[in-house]
């Protein structure tokens, strides 16, 4: 039980680290050219995506977050970049500019992604500190593989939920993408 409490605390710290980097990224002022490039890149990336594409994108990001130390740093960069994209999308968009960037993370899929990234970032730190202490990593193989499986499952469920929300809101059709382009 003590291990579970400690592990959940580390996951919470991983989530907080991601949220802080996301918040910083969403509050960095962007010049118009860079903002347009981010919007265009994002629109190109999501124009033909489905739930499998969402899942694969998020899974690859989270798998990289499991790498000792590098994964924690990548998690910070990923949070910052995601916040930056949200900020770029909110520029000249009357709806997005009125809401907190953190709101998107309170969606069902956002919560699943945050929990998954928290698991991955914290596991990266655990393995890194074991390497620094020159402690055997043999005891980390099973928990790491189990957590990768949990993260994959959570992200798959999250991708289905996200895709369903996108489909129901009609934000995945060409008309919505054209409207998003006009806000550029």
Image (cartoon, rainbow, N blue to C red):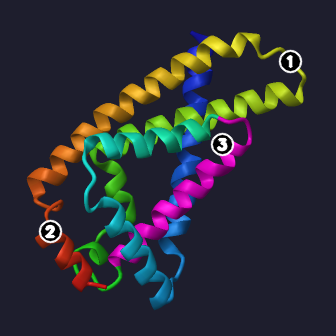
Q: Is residue 13 visible?
A: no
Instruction: Classify residue 6 as left or right of residue 126.
Output: left
Does the magenta segment cover residue 80?
Answer: yes
Q: Sequence order check: which comes first, mark 1 or mark 3?
A: 3
- Badge 3: how crowded within 10 Å, few (<14), some, or many (20+)? many
User: Looking at this view, is 95 or 53 the one in front?
Assistant: 53
Q: Which residue is mark 2?
A: 174
Residue at (13% x, 63% y) in the render: 173
Residue at (61% x, 53% y) in the render: 76
Residue 123 in the image, given as x and y percentages of width and height: 64, 30
Residue 9, quarter of the rendered image: top right
The range drawn in magenta is 67-90
Where 107 falls versus 175 (above or below)?
Answer: above
Q: Which residue is mark 1?
A: 135
Q: CA distance from mark 2 to mark 3?
A: 35 Å
Q: Is residue 152 visible?
A: yes
Q: Which residue is mark 3?
A: 71
Instruction: Classify residue 152 as left or right of residue 144.
Output: left
């Amino acid at each position: 039980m003590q291990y579970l409490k400690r592990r959940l605390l580390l996951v919470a710290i991983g989530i907080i680290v991601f949220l802080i980097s996301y918040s910083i990224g969403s509050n960095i002022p962007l010049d118009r050219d860079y903002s347009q490039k981010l919007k265009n890149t994002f629109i190109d990336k999501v124009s033909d995506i489905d739930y499998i594409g969402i899942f694969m994108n998020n899974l690859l990001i989270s798998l990289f977050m499991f790498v000792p130390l590098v994964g924690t740093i990548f998690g910070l960069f990923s949070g910052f970049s995601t916040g930056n994209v949200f900020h770029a999308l909110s520029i000249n968009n009357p709806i997005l500019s009125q809401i907190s960037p953190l709101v998107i993370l309170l969606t069902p899929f956002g919560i699943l992604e945050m929990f998954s990234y928290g698991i991955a970032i914290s596991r990266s730190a655990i393995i890194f500190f074991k390497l620094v202490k020159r402690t055997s990593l043999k005891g980390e193989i099973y928990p790491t593989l189990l957590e990768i499986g949990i993260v994959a499952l959570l992200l798959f469920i999250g991708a289905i939920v996200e895709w369903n929300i996108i489909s129901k809101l009609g934000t995945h059709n060409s008309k919505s993408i054209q409207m998003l382009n006009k806000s550029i």
